Image (tube, coloured by chain):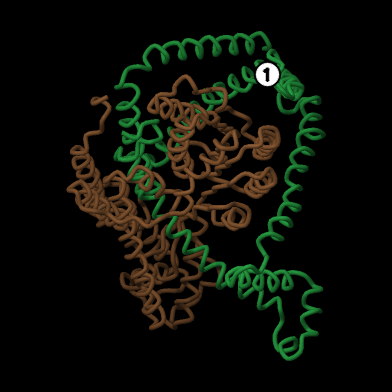
Amino acid sequence: MSRLKYNHKRSNYLLMFVLLAFSLLFAAGAARATGEAALENPQTAEVTAAAAAPAEPDIEAPAELKIDYNGSPEQIKTLCEHVLKARALASKDLEETEARALVMDSLAQLPIEKLTLAQVYVHAVALGEKRFDMSHNYFNPKRSNVLIAGILLLSFIGYFTYHARQGKDMFIRKIAGLSAIDEAVGRATEMGKPVLFVPGIYDMDDIQTIAGVSILGHVAKKTAEYETNLLVPCTRSLVMSTSQEVVREAYLKAGRIDSFKAENIRYLTDDQFGYVAGVDGIMMREKPAANFYLGVFFAESLILAETGHHVGAIQIAGTAMVHQIPFFVAACDYTLIGEELFAASAYLTREPMQLGTLKGQDVGKFLIIIVIVLGIVLETCGITFFSNWFITH
Amino acid sequence: MALFNGFLIVFFIVLFAALIFVGQTLRTSQFLRRKLPLAFCFFMGVIIIFQFFIPPENPLYKEIEDLSTKWIQIISSFALVIGLISLVTMNFNKISRKYEDWQYAVVLLLGFFVTTFYGLRDGFEGKEFDFIFNYMYVPMQSTMFSILAFFVASAAFRAFRARSREATLLLTAAVIVMLGRVELGSVLWSYIPFIGNYFDVSDLAQWINKVFTTAGQRAILLGASLGYIAASFKILLGIERSYFGSEE
């Protein structure tokens, strides 16, 4: 078993590697974004030359712009609107401030006293073509905010994971829904009825499903110890295979592999309401004493939870789908709301590494609160650049 | 064409059986069971993150997107076969061992084989397949969805009991929102002395939805999004491995 043990020391190297990769990516992207590479490229150089030239045959300005330019704010506004429209047609996202910057850049490069609005428009769009030609870039500067936020969060996680490994005590608040798992399985054992686990209706590519399957491992360990039947109807084949492996390992670790029944972890259908009908049927026939709904849920959430309530099961639900949380709160005994579902693995295993990531996540949340308050203050004062920086493209 | 299709089906069944055999033979290898999936997970995760930061105009963006979509389709197709084998085997066992309510398994298998037969023979446009879809599948789906209305009523009845201060607040907000959503609510509201003519109940309902509900939802979303990111990092770095079936 020692070969199976994860070498925690290696996490540092992984973390450093990811940080290094991100830094290199950022540096490469920034270098590209400055246009150094673009100038060397003949194709981009042609576009630059075209933008500097007084006429642009490929871009035709709207007829209403064929009037002399007098530099009034109304004219600049009209120009911006047309530039925005042109960029939207070319499927490039552009903010009004950016359109204004384009127009101003164009004006700064041209002998404006001899121009019509139409000529300014043509030059502004040509300048935009040059600026938005990202086909040779490997980093999108518009997503630098996401990159910085990601690196910050990763740093917090890395820092607290390191401290957790050093043996620093990490406090984690009580989560009623997770503490009630043992109680629910115990109740089912006392009543001699099975436990039903529903891992949501999404595939293994969703983090919520993975979080649900992680909790399934813990539930399976308990059902193996108490020798209670565990039913896991799945809506995706990959979830079924993963669940079978997770439950098998749990039974193996509990020393009850002979009690493991692979046929209890079954595939029903990929169809949403077909799956609901199947699970409801299982509930009505098997009458489980404890129901777990952990993963991604949509309209089926209330149908499942209400059927479970009618058969008298103790119910624990958890999802990050904000529109389904009220249904679970109304119909279930315990509900893991949003982030609590993702904290389950750390809460149940109490592994220092996992607790460290949880602490890092909390610091990230605190930082977001500060940013929100700062954003509110600055927006109220009419300063918009701060909140604009957070817009993702 | 039908012969070719049949040959293809047989070929894939044989290929799948061979893959299962190879997988079963190698399943004891710790490298295959633990390290290789972790390495794949890390490698693919980094590539997808890398793609997110590439400008969509760069051809590499499209190439990664196309490649990942194709791989997802291939893996899903194989996964579907696993699911179907489980479904058919389990229901056959149910019938052969005469478990309780085994008759339902007969209906399920009959439906499965008949639909598959017409689907493979005529495609999605076939008359029989179309009949099954429009006159059996769609009505059954609608029936299940319509049950939701009754469950909403029964869940609301339980949730809206004024047992505590919080439950009373919930009940009050719910009554206001319900009144604001129906025409009759506005009429009834207008009869309430003092406040009835001061403002409309639909405005109040809208305000509750826009301010309180949106604020609560955004708070949950922020926490959940951070949880998403942290969980993704944990999976990429191999800290979270419980979905492999081991907590070690």
Q: Nearer the viewer, residue A157 or A85?
A: A157
Residue shown at 24%/25% (left/top)? Answer: A3
In-image side of B193 versus B211 (left or right) = right
Q: Chain of mark 1?
A: B
From the top left corner, tell me how far across and down residue A124 is, in percent.
Answer: 40, 65
Mark 1: amino acid: Lys
Across the whole image, how many numbered discs are drawn on residues? 1
Q: Is residue B223 above or below residue A179?
A: below
- The residue drawn where x is 53% and y is 23% is A261
Give the percent coordinates (x, y) of residue B226. Answer: 39, 55
Q: Position of residue A129 (x, y in %)?
A: 39, 56
Q: Which residue is mark 1?
A: B94
Of the pair B190 and A260, the residue shown nearer to us: A260
Q: Is residue B131 above or below residue A8?
A: above
Quadrant where the N terminus of chain B sits is top right
Image quarter for residue A313? top right
Residue A12 appears at what percent x and percent y? 19, 42
The chain drawn in brown is A
Residue B216 appears in the picture as rendered? yes
Foreground residue among B97 and B184: B97
Residue at the far bottom: name it.
B194
Say if A88 sits above or below B193 in the image: above
Quadrant containing the C terminus of chain B in the rendered view: top left
Residue at image position (58%, 56%) is A329
Residue A32 makes an appearance in the image? no
Q: Dot 1: few (<14), some (14–19), or many (≥20) neighbours within 10 Å?
A: some
For residue B124, above or below residue A150: above
Q: Mark 1: which secondary structure?
A: helix
Q: Colour of chain B?
A: green
Residue located at (46% from left, 30% from top):
A224
Asked whether A247 or A55 is in front, the reply is A247
